[in-house]
Image (tube, grey):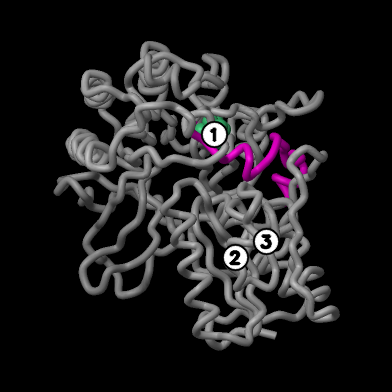
Amino acid sequence: MRAYYYTFGCKVNQYETENIRERLESFGYETSADHKAAEVCIVNSCTVTSEADKKCRQLIHKIRSENPSCILVCAGCMTQAHRDIAQRLPECDIIAGSHNKTRIPELIETFLNTGERVVAITDNDAERLIEPMTNYSADDKTRAYIKIQDGCDMHCSYCIIPNARGHIRSKPLGDIISEAKALIDAGHKEIILTGINLCCYGREGSGKQRLTDVIEALDSVDADFRIRLSSLEPELITDTDIERWAACAKLCPHFHLSLQSGCNEVLRAMRRRYTTDEYSALCEKLRQTFTCCAVTTDIMVGFPAETEEQHLQSLKFAEQIAFAEAHIFPYSRRPDTAADKLPCQTDGRTKHRRAAEMKEVCLRSRRGFLGSLVGTVQRVLFEKETSPEYHQGFADNYAPVRIARITDGSLRRHFGRVLIESSDGEWCYGSLIGQDIN
Ligand code: SF4
């Protein structure tokens, strides 16, 4: 049988789609790039915003209308977070909650045997394990993700993720290292550690290992690759962590510290656990420790009752931190969250205006960051060629870099040292120097 896969949402979801694919391939399924030609269509959903829900439902409707006879599966966060989901997705044959994604081959089997719709949603309270991945198809990607953690127990007031993902759980260190070695053997040169709340790695039960132990263990793997961290929660990073990270030569100087708001009153209403002073001190420490360090972030605008004055404070704080990159989101109401029940929801026009203002501030600081690299030497992992002019890739600090083509062949999956000579605010341009091409 042929299976079509579509993933909404974050890198963790993308990783999990690969996990579903790996499992179905072990049962003899082939991958179809076209939903109309597939016998099974799997939509791995996201529910982080109401817009994400809408897009999932639209795709499900499109697949069903264009391929009426396929087995249509909706899996993931949207199916787990909303109790009435089975009624809301009548076009789906199989609905698999977050904890049942790995059972999809078995659920398809049940559907084929019974002809009855299958709804497999189990609650978030039961003890869960995190799924291993073992089999890597050699694709052409330079970067590969390892999901090391799932779930979140923080319950920030706007966030539906704890409902969709359940309690924190972590992948055993030995499994992470095995996965990393398999990815490196398959040719990947960058390993990105990812999770729903990465800094919570190992904090469940009586486990003693933490994220920094994972980074150190990975750093000691004897191979030519680099390590990048996905989003981090600022309050869980200590000075000791930063000192230990600094001793890990493979760790990229790129830290995505989720900010959400640059106003302390709004942070409190969001139930975030740090102040702007603490956040600022953390950025300072990272920048003092790591050369050409990039601090990137997520910022939400238009939280319920956010005043114009608070928004201006947030803008000013973002300007002061000068992020290398920022993802800006208008607040989106999610059912069953504390913020959904707050009075004084911000209207759509105000949210979009504030998002545009925040984007403008963060775009300026991005241009400033890229410009600040002119005259420095950056290690770049090349990813592809843009024909005919450039080899392009990303520096350790995730700055996008281009050099003029020096060969008709490819530098893909090679590291090079590049002297940055200019920036147009979107790319850094430079020349290859030294002999670090391996
Ligand atoms: S830390 Fe807060 S924002 Fe992040 S996943 Fe957990 S509840 Fe959501």
**Horizontal and vertical percent position of residue 421:** 17, 45
CB of mark 1 within 8 Å of CB of mark 3? no
Residue at 36% in and 50% down: 394
Mark 2 Cβ and ligand 1 under 8 Å apart: no
Which of label 1 and label 3 is nearer to you? 1
**Position of 34 relative to 81 (above/below):** below
Dot 2 amino acid type: Leu
**Position of 404 relative to 3 (above/below):** above
Mark 1 Cβ and ligand 1 under 8 Å apart: no
Can residue 59 be seen in this snapshot?
yes
Residue at 40% in and 50% down: 436
Decide which of 365, 242 is in the foreground and name it: 365
Q: Is residue 84 magenta?
A: no
**Horizontal and vertical percent position of residue 140:** 50, 68
Give the CA separation, mark 1 to mark 2. 22 Å
Q: Check disc 1: other Cα within 10 Å, few if <14, some if 14-19, many if 20+.
A: some
Tell me the SS state at disc 2: loop
Can residue 366 be seen in this snapshot?
no
**Position of 35 relative to 14 (above/below):** below
Q: Is residue 172 magenta?
A: yes
Q: Is residue 375 left or right of residue 328?
A: left
Give the CA separation, mark 1 to mark 3. 29 Å
Quarter of the displayed picture in which ligand 1 can be seen? top right
Q: Earlier in the sequence, mark 1 or mark 3?
A: 3
Decide which of 347, 354 is in the foreground and name it: 347
Residue topped by disc 3: 19
Dot 1 amino acid type: Thr
Residue 337 disc label: 1
Q: Check disc 2: other Cα within 10 Å, few if <14, some if 14-19, many if 20+.
A: some
**Horizontal and vertical percent position of residue 405:** 25, 66
Tell me the SS state at disc 1: loop
> Magenta segment range?
158-178
